[in-house]
Each structure stands twice: as C-alpha cells, then as structure tokens.
C-alpha cells in the first residue's frame, strides 16, 4: 500500500568513456549479438568479454554475456553480470527480470524438482506428494502450477481442509478473489475452527468490497482465536477507508498489543498519522518498521513522501535515492517523485531521465505503452503545466489489503 502518489519519475546513469573505447566496445557487442543469433555461444562470450574490456561500463555487453551464461546454466556467472548491469543502469528492466530468473534457477535446481516428481511417481495415490510440489511451486511464485498440484491432490482427498486452504491461498495470490472466497467458505464448513481459513475468507471478501460479510468473518476469526492480530489490521483498514481515523488507530493498537512485531499494523498506523498530519509520529512509525524490515519499500517511500509534502526536499530525495538504489530499483513512484523534485530545482534533464525510467517500469508492469515521451527541451513546460502535483493537487490514496 502506498501512502500518496505524487506525480513524478528515475535518473538513468550517465556513463562517460573515451569515444574510441566506447565505439570499440559497441562493435564487439554487436558482433556478439549476431553470434548469439547463430547459436555460437562460446564465440559470443569471447566478443562480449572484449566489449567489456574496451568499455567497462557497457551495460549491454554485460547483459548479453549474462544471457549467454544463463543459457549455458552458468548461473553464478550470469548473476554477477546481471548485477553489474543494474549497478551501471539501475532502471535496466530486462536485467532485473533475468536476475530474478537466475535466482529462481539457483534456488530451485533440477534435483529439487525431480525429487518431488519422483515422490509422485512412486506414490501417485498420496495427495501429500502433490501438495509438497504445489507448495514448492508456490514459494517460487509459480501460482498457476501450484494451483494445478493442489487440484490434483483434492481429487485424491476431496474434503481435506488443509489442501483446500492451500488452493484458496493460490487463488488469493493470483487475485482470483471469488474463487478464493468459494474455496475458503468450503474450508470453514468442513472445519469451523480453522482460524486462518476464516481470516483469509474475510480478506477475499474485503478485496471484493463485501465489507459487512468481511466483518462477520473477522469476528468469527477472533471467536476461534482471540489473539489473531492480523484481524485487527483488516478492521483498521475498513475504518480507514471510511475515514474514521481514530477508530483505525485503535484497531492497529490492538493488533500491536497482541503482536508487537506486526509490521503491517505499524505501517498502517503510520499512514493514519500522516493523513492526520502527525508527521513526526508517522516518520517514527515508518522508521520502526524499517528497523525490523530494512527492505520494506512502502515504508521507505512514505518517509520520502512525508518529507516531500513538508518541503524538506533534500531529505525526500535522500529516501527516493535509497529506494531506487538499494531497496527496490523497480519502485516506479520513487522515480516519478524524484523527477518532480529535479524539475522544481530546475534540473529538467534529470527530471526527464527519471520520467523515462518511470515510464519504462510502468510499461513492464502493465504491458501498456508509456505516456507521451517528451524531448528534453519540452520537459520544463510539461512539469510546470501538466503535472497535477505541481499545482498542489494530490492523487487519491490507494488502499489495498496485503494478504499473508
């Protein structure tokens, strides 16, 4: 969940090199690209390496070599090259994607898959073998494959609430909220004291805007387990949506009393503080979240936004930089907001660069073409006349429930 969405954009790294070295490196890289198309991978590796030797900051050469290493299952070498690309160009979207794919392969070697497939082959009538493979897929965020395994397990044991629960979580993670609701409903009918099932049923209802039904299931969750801290977080979200700020804080307080490490409760409480313009309390709460989870990008982003809204632009820039460089290089709003600050300071070239980075990331996430791409000499007028946030407007807050 993001506190505010300022109208803004990321700075592409400007690489300086001697003209001869740059040109020579590009030539080797282009030759290597051609060799890859001919499937001459070893020769391509040699050319990419020559390109890098000629220009150590040629991101495209590192990326190309990383792809070849990936194809050859030299995963450690691939990861090193993709990391180098990101160091040079933090907004190189394809490098982030390939690095993620590389980590998946490193973390899930063939023998881990084969072990689970072998278990199914040896005991095809045991539903738990399918569940084990499904959970493994789920951890790798391969939700469609996970769902298929859970369904096969349910064919063998149709009324097993724990298998059914896993299927519901798969649906929930994929945004199939109606399917999730139907599945969790069946789980609670089979096992009425399954607290996680009641809670996730409430979440799936909340996602569909069924507030009254959601409240009923949250109450059932607490009847089964009065210490279910996350239930109060959802109650807080409902109050927050209705702009009942003090009620929301009271709910988050209950969540934290039960579980002091409930970071979602503390994060949501920070949002309410910020909406009430209790900025110092909001900053302290977000900082506390980051102490427990330094990679909590939304908390870091909200710190930047608070500084931004209170005209402490250098501090805001510091946090947007931290997100883009260390926490989440694909956090598009950090680039969008940083571009606004650059524009306000008159550095329209960097604002333009950040806007492009924002656009590329949005296209990658949504599959849609970015908005109109402006030339650098048009960027000042664009920001001064076309960006709502520069006119003192704030976009609607987006409240969304984070499922377990």
Image: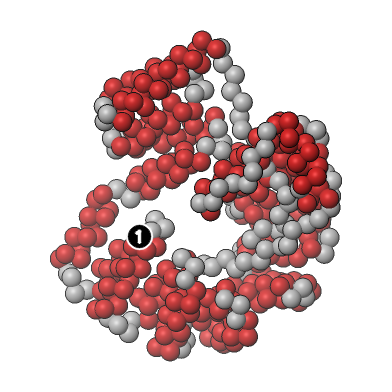
Percent x, y of residue 117: 22, 60
The residue at the point 47 percent across, 66 percent down is 173
Whether residue 94 appears in this view of the structure is yes
Circle 1 SS class: helix
**Which x, y percent locates residue 281?**
79, 59
- Along the horizontal axis of the image, is 333 left or right of 161? right
User: Which residue is at a point 78% across and 51% down the rendered structure image?
Assistant: 388
**Residue visible at 26% across and 78% down?**
155
Q: Would you name the residue on which mark 1 appears?
A: 137
> Where does residue 135 sit, x and y in percent of width and height?
36, 64
Q: Closer to the camera, 380 or 291?
A: 380
> Splitting the image into 4 quarters, where does residue 141 fall?
bottom left
Quadrant where the N terminus sits is bottom right
> Which residue is found at the position 42% from the left and 83% from the top?
187
In the picture, residue 70 is in which quadrant? top left
Please give left or right for residue 44 compared with residue 197 in the image.
left
Label 1: few (<14), some (14–19) or many (≥20) C-alpha neighbours in 10 Å: many
Residue 61, position as x, y percentages in the image:
43, 26
Q: How is the image coloured?
A: secondary structure
Q: Nearer the viewer, residue 288 or 18?
A: 18
Q: In front here: 128 or 360?
A: 360
Q: Residue 401's image quarter?
A: bottom right
Considering every residue shown, the one lying at the far top of the view is 20
Q: How many marks?
A: 1
Q: Is residue 227 visible?
A: no
Which residue is outermost to the left?
Answer: 122
């Amino acid at each position: 969940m993001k506190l505010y969405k300022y109208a803004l954009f990321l700075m592409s790294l400007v690489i300086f090199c001697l003209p001869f070295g740059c040109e020579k490196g590009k030539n080797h890289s282009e030759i290597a690209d051609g060799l890859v198309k001919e499937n001459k991978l070893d020769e391509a590796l040699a050319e990419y390496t020559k390109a890098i030797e000629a220009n150590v900051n040629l991101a495209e050469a590192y990326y190309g070599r990383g792809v070849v290493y990936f194809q050859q299952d030299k995963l450690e070498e691939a990861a090193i090259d993709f990391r180098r690309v990101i160091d040079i160009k933090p907004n190189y979207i394809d490098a982030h994607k390939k690095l993620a794919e590389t980590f998946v392969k490193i973390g899930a070697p063939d023998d881990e898959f084969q072990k689970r497939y072998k278990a199914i082959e040896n005991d095809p009538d045991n539903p738990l073998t399918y569940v084990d493979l499904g959970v493994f897929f789920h951890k790798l965020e391969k939700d469609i494959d996970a769902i298929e395994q859970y369904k096969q397990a349910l064919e063998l044991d149709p009324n097993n609430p724990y298998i059914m629960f896993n299927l519901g979580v798969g649906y929930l993670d994929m945004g199939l909220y109606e399917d999730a609701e139907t599945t969790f409903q069946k789980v609670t009918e089979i096992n009425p004291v399954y607290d996680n099932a009641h809670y996730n049923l409430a979440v799936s209802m909340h996602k569909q805007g069924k507030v009254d039904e959601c409240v009923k299931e949250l109450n059932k969750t607490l009847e089964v387990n009065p210490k279910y801290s996350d239930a109060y977080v959802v109650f807080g979200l409902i109050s927050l949506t209705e702009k009942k700020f003090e009620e929301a804080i009271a709910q988050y307080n209950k969540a934290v009393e039960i579980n002091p490490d409930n970071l979602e409760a503390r994060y949501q409480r920070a949002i309410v503080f910020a909406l009430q313009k209790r900025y110092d309390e909001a900053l302290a709460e977000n900082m506390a979240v980051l102490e427990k989870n330094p990679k909590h990008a939304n908390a870091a982003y909200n710190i930047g936004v608070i500084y931004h809204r209170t005209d402490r632009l250098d501090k805001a820039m510091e946090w947007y930089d931290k997100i883009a460089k260390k926490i989440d290089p694909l956090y598009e709003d950090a680039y969008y907001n940083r571009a606004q600050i650059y524009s306000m300071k008159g550095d329209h070239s960097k604002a333009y660069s950040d806007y492009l980075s924002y656009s590329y990331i949005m296209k990658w996430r949504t599959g849609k073409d970015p908005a109109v791409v402006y030339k650098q000499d048009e960027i000042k007028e664009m920001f001064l006349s076309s960006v709502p946030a520069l006119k003192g407007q704030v976009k609607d807050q987006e409240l969304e429930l984070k499922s377990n």
